[in-house]
Amino acid sequence: MTMILVILIGLAAGTLAGIIGFGGSTILLPVLSLQFGPKAAVPIMAIAAIFGNFARVVAWWRVVSWPAVGAYSITAIPAAWFGARTMLSLDPTTLELALGVFFIIMIPLRRWFAVSGLRVTLPGLCIAGAVIGYLTGIVANTGPINTPFFLAHGLTKGAFVGTEATASLAMFLSKAAAFRSFGALPTETITNGIIVGISLMAGTYIAKHLLHSINEAVFDGLMDVLLLVAGIAMIMSALYA
């Protein structure tokens, strides 16, 4: 597998994540593990995710819900740092298995949130940020967990993608800083992460044009598919680790 192939897959992953709001890590992490080894894949993905989320923030800047970002990030930023520290001494296999099952459960749960009219308030986002931020520090892919909380806050399409990306950007910056302070981000890892991240950014701008033409039903359907794929991918990763 060559770096060119990694970049092309990163472009596709960035396009998908730009439409749905998550999914880039689900596609890229197995590819990065094959190319660079599983130990280097998570820090590389952390750097690449910074670029991918930054591109989504820029693309949807005008519709970002800043109160939601603030409520979520105030707890998610320190939690992600502590989660990254925990990762160095914790076997994440069991946690990955549990998260994979949780992602699949989220499909009917997200639908129930929508039909029940249940709303997640700013304090609810604050609590979610603490839990999800910590998990993000430990495992590479927790993007799907954000989905029901931000959607239940009343966000959809561009507003959802931009707000979730802004909150995730804060988490991944914290996670990358933790990796750097623990010596897990050598220059080569940072360089590879930047290269992959640029391909994610390019995909985001392709996605912005596509998202305008997608109706709500298709958007919801794509989310369910990605939640299912993410759940299965994490379960398989845990079982064959």
Image: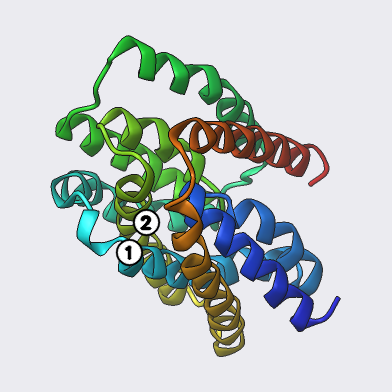
Q: Quadrant of the N terminus?
A: bottom right
Most foreground residue, 93 or 217: 217
Residue 165, numbered label: 2
Q: Residues within 10 Å of mark 2 (few under 14, many from 20)?
A: many
- Work out whether residue 86 can be spotted: no
Decide: is 1 above or below 9: below
x, y percentage for residue 46?
51, 66
Most foreground residue, 108 or 60: 60
Name the side, left or right, on which 93 lies relative to 177.
right
Cβ–Cβ below 8 Å for labels 2 and 1?
Answer: yes
Most foreground residue, 216 or 109: 216
Look at label 1 and name its amino acid: Val
Gap in Å between the C-alphas at discs 2 and 1? 6 Å
Read off the residue under disc 1: 57
Look at label 2 and name its amino acid: Ala
Q: Secondary structure at mark 2?
A: helix
